[in-house]
Image (spheres, rainbow, N blue to C red):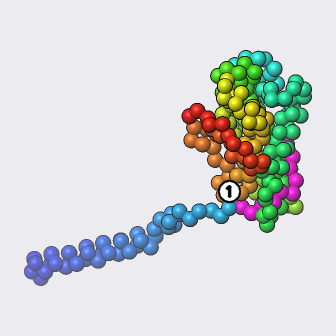
Amino acid sequence: MSMGKVIAALVLALGASACASVDTASRNAPYDTVPTDMAAPAPSYALESFDVLVPTSLKVSEANLYYPPGDIVWRGETRGNRYEQVKAIFDESIRLGTRPLDGAMPVRVKIEVTRFHALTEKARYTVGGVHSIEFVMTIIEPTSGAVLRGPKPIKASLVGYGGQMAFEAEARGLTQKYRITQHLARVVHDELTKAEGFVAPKRGVTQRIQPLAPAAIEVAAAE
């Protein structure tokens, strides 16, 4: 056989081998090459019951400092049992946040508060700050006890007005209690109606509330 024929035969053999490799690679391609941009469906829930736990192991502070140490700092009501007051706020928030729901699946909601650090008098009447609120939320199928979502740690921080802005907010009925209650209602609503649940803003702090009910006009917050 001539040298030219030998070279031609080698070229044909290599070409066939390459085609076989490409074909094998395409047939063995991993499933993650399939487009995955399909959005998950939103849940369809209806609230059957709920439980809110505010552990007494959380430390309450009544110190009138700009940022006192403690897990629970609450001055939006007269001095009393802060654990009960915080629980009542969450109870009302859940009722507001789930009142519009009429989904196909009944669920039970469990919330454990891990932090409720609102503004002191000193901060509210001067510089303002952040209502730092954290809790763990679990959504449960009540018959089987199966966990549908969670336990999910949630940081639901909200801008707290100070100085003149705080006075203007109070005049419009936007008290600390009202704003926090409505904000938490929206957080709970998102957890029960959106596929991804509540997603905190990029900066981690919500600037303005979006009331579920009753409607109210927010004071323009400084960015």
Image coords of residue 46 (percent x, y): 81, 60
Image coords of residue 198 (percent x, y): 67, 49
Q: Nearer the viewer, residue 96 or 132?
A: 96
Q: Residue farthest to the bottom?
A: 1
* Residue for badge 1: 194
Three-letter amino acid code of the residue under disc 1: Lys
Image coords of residue 124 (percent x, y): 71, 24
Q: Nearer the viewer, residue 30 or 69?
A: 69
Quadrant in which the N terminus appears = bottom left
For the point 57% across and 37% down, which residue is it? 203
Query: How would you classify the magenta stretch by its main secondary structure?
Result: strand
Q: Residues within 10 Å of mark 1 (few under 14, many from 20)?
A: some
Compared across the picture, whether 95 is left or right of 31 comes to right
Q: Is residue 159 visible?
A: yes
Magenta range is: 43-53
Image coords of residue 50 (percent x, y): 86, 50
For the point 87% across and 61% down, which residue is it? 143
